[in-house]
Amino acid sequence: MNTHSTGAQTHVYVTHSSEETIALGRELALLLAPPKMLVLRGDLGAGKTTLVKGIAAALGAAEPEEITSPTFTLIHEYEGQLPASDAQPSAQAVRLYHIDVYRLESQRQLDTLGMEEFLIPDSIVLVEWGEKFPWIVAHSHGEISIHALHGEERKITLSLH
């Protein structure tokens, strides 16, 4: 896995396998102190759910094999905790929401999800296809974009604002 930072709030990574993408998700979880909502950008099959597997595992919210795409259920909710760190001396409870709005076509449909209810102090909200909706983009704290390069190689960019 290759990595470099392009500034204080943007980090670019290259992974070479699904296992490396999951491992990167574990690392990124440490950068996602709640409350946080991020748009997950990437083509179908780019690895968005694979990255979420690592984030959920790092939070102790689920094992990687338990994480599936919420394409048809729209929302998966997991409970876990952020590990203790220098900034946070004790573990902190966290709710991880993995949301997929690919099948939604209108703001009205999005409104029925009650997205604002997920924006609570202990939540990390990861929204696949969130760039489709201005409301999500306006309320997000940034995005994670995933681009397939060659084979299983992925360029993953975390941008926080």
Image (cartoon, rainbow, N blue to C red):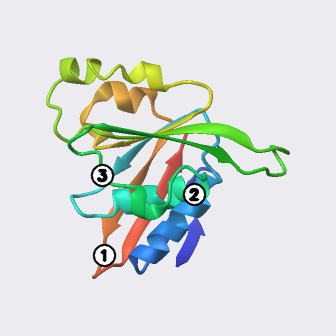
Residue where numbered disc 3 is placed: 69
> Which residue corresponds to the image point at 57% horizontal and 62% vertical from the top-left?
26
Asked if residue 94 lies left or right of residue 151, the reply is right
Q: Is residue 131 visible?
A: yes
Q: CA distance from mark 2 to mark 1?
A: 20 Å
Which residue type does callout 1 highlight? Leu
Which picture quadrant has residue 34? top right
* Secondary-structure class at tag 2: helix
> Which residue corresponds to the image point at 62% horizontal and 26% vertical from the top-left?
121
| Residue 61: % across, % down | 55, 49
Residue where numbered disc 1 is placed: 149
| Residue 18: % across, % down | 40, 74
Which residue type does callout 2 highlight? Leu
User: Tag 1 or tag 2, which sits nearer the N-term?
Assistant: 2
* Secondary-structure class at tag 3: loop
> Which residue corresponds to the image point at 36% horizontal and 78% vertical from the top-left?
153
Relative height, residue 111 to residue 83 (above, below): above
User: Tag 3 or tag 2, which sits nearer the N-term?
Assistant: 2
In front of the other: 14 or 21: 21
Asked if residue 4 lies left or right of residue 148, the reply is right
| Residue 75: % across, % down | 34, 37
Tag 3–tag 1 contact (CB < 8 Å): no
Relative height, residue 86 to residue 118 (above, below): below
Residue where numbered disc 2 is placed: 28
Q: Is residue 11 visible?
A: no
User: Tag 1 or tag 3, which sits nearer the N-term?
Assistant: 3
Which picture quadrant has residue 91? top right
